[in-house]
Image (cartoon, grey):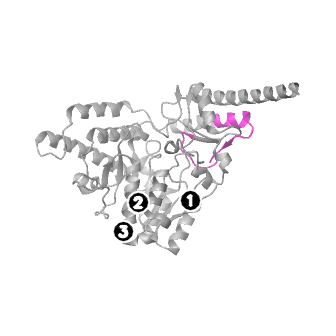
């Protein structure tokens, strides 16, 4: 099976697995306990926290380990919805991940607003400035890279506009981290991420909480994580996640442009050989690994099943929306119709994906399309003969 669903999850990297086993076997004690063995675990956990903080351009005390970006994003929305200025509401990009969008709706209710976006789902810094010149929201939340289309937001400019306006800012960086350098993310504001998106284990992530928000609480019931997130820490998962991100950050970056070229060549084949196919965000700045397609015929689940039989794992979009019959809200925000959205297929590669994998996938997609076309033609011919 050739895997093309890396935006949903990634295999655990060798370095993450090695760290996991080391920590599980030798550093399994509760880091909050008072004896020396526990102190060893606590020291390792704090070393990992400091390493992650260095990549996120913040202080170690501002990094909180969580179960993932979903928990962290929910905690941020709950926190700001409880504040005295919460009536001002929260402003989001219209293409946010469900764990941001739905959490905002649960906690803020009717106080959720969306910035306008262009046909690729990008929010312009000018639109943010216009909103902040007219009002002061309780929170602005804009993701770094879209999980379905791969389109990048002008996140640095938006974060700076919020900083200058004194408006709290949050960035869901789950899809950016491990694909693009962490140093290019905003050094200001709240930030969230998940380890399994870049070769770490599932069930662990992080939350960056700027130092001024020292009353932040994700959950209560203990003094772990300096009181910001109660519950016994998971050092094997946390250190594995940090190891995975360090490996991605220090990996050779020369191949990124080349990998994007493989993706572009794949899209060129489909645009040439499949009439009516659309590439979402093709002319926007995107993650190098993502191709989001609107196929000309058939619901997306049929494409996924047919390609699965051909030996390729692809998806219909956000893994968190799998099982839902509602069309992608990301595509709706971009102006696509519900019928078009139901024909959307997401392709996402990883560092393990080679040029030949992309070529083979292109051939398989075209082959599936032609098989369907031939089948439709045969059915039509049979109908004519029977008449």
Q: Assess whether mark 2 and mark 3 are in contact (beta carbons under 8 angstroms).
A: no
Tell me if I can see residue 226 in this picture. yes
Q: In which quarter of the image is the C terminus?
A: top right
* 268 versus 332 height, above or below: above
Tell me if I can see residue 188 in this picture. no
**How far, Cα to Cα, is label 3 from label 2?**
10 Å
Q: Is mark 2 on a helix, strand or loop?
A: helix
Q: Mark 1 points at which residue?
A: 123
Q: Position of residue 53 (x, y in %)?
A: 32, 50
Q: What element carries label 3?
A: loop
Q: Which residue is drawn at 68% across and 27% down?
A: 367
Q: Quadrant of residue 121?
A: bottom right
**How far, Cα to Cα, is label 3 from label 1?**
26 Å
Is residue 271 found inside the magenta-colored segment of the image?
A: yes
Residue 83: give its label: 3
Q: Assess whether mark 2 and mark 1 are in contact (beta carbons under 8 angstroms).
A: no
Q: Mark 2 points at which residue?
A: 77
- What's drawn in magenta, residue-wise? 265-290
Residue 360 shown left or right of residue 177 in the figure: right
Q: Position of residue 134 (x, y in %)?
A: 52, 75
Q: Where is residue 346 in the image (x, y as percent from the top left)?
A: 58, 40
Residue 133: give its label: none
Which badge, 3 or 1, comes first in the chain's sequence? 3
Q: Mark 3: few, some, or many residues within 10 Å (few <14, many ≥20)?
A: few
* 5 versus 78 height, above or below: above
Q: Where is residue 171 in the image (x, y as percent from the top left)?
A: 44, 55
Give the mark toward the camera: 3 or 1: 3
**How far, Cα to Cα, is label 1 from label 2?**
20 Å
């Amino acid at each position: 099976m050739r895997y093309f669903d890396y935006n949903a999850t990634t295999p655990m990297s060798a370095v993450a697995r090695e760290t996991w086993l080391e920590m599980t076997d030798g550093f399994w004690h509760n880091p909050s306990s008072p004896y020396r063995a526990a102190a060893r675990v606590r020291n390792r956990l704090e070393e990992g926290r400091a390493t992650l903080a260095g990549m996120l351009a913040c202080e170690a005390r501002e990094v909180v380990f969580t179960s993932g970006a979903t928990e962290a994003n929910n905690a941020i929305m709950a926190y700001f919805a409880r504040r005295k200025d919460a009536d001002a509401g929260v402003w989001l990009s219209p293409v946010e991940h469900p764990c941001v969008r739905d959490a905002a709706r649960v906690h803020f209710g009717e106080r959720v607003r969306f910035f306008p976006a262009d046909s690729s789902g990008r929010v312009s810094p000018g639109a943010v400035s216009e909103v902040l010149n007219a009002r002061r929201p309780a929170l602005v939340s804009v993701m770094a890279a879209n999980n379905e289309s791969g389109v990048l937001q002008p996140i640095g400019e938006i974060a700076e506009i919020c900083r200058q306006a004194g408006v709290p800012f949050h960035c869901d960086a789950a899809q950016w981290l491990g694909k693009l350098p962490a140093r290019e993310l905003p050094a200001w504001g709240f930030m969230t991420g998940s380890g399994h998106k870049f070769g770490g284990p599932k069930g662990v992530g992080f939350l960056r909480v700027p130092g001024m928000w020292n009353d932040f609480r994700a959950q209560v019931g203990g003094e772990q994580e300096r009181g910001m997130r109660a519950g016994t820490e998971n050092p094997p998962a946390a250190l594995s996640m940090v190891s995975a991100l360090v490996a991605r950050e220090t990996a050779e970056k020369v191949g990124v442009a080349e990998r994007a070229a493989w993706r572009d060549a794949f899209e060129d084949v489909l645009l040439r050989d499949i009439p009516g196919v659309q590439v979402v965000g093709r002319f926007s700045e995107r993650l190098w690994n993502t191709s989001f397609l609107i196929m000309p015929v058939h619901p997306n689940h049929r494409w996924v099943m047919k390609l699965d039989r051909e030996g390729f794992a692809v998806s219909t979009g956000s893994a968190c929306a799998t099982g839902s019959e509602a069309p992608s809200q990301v595509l709706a925000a971009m102006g696509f119709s519900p019928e078009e959205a139901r024909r959307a297929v997401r392709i996402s590669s990883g560092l393990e994906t080679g040029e030949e994998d992309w070529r083979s996938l292109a051939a398989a997609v075209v082959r599936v399309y032609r098989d369907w076309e031939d089948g439709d033609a045969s059915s039509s011919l049979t109908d004519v003969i029977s008449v």
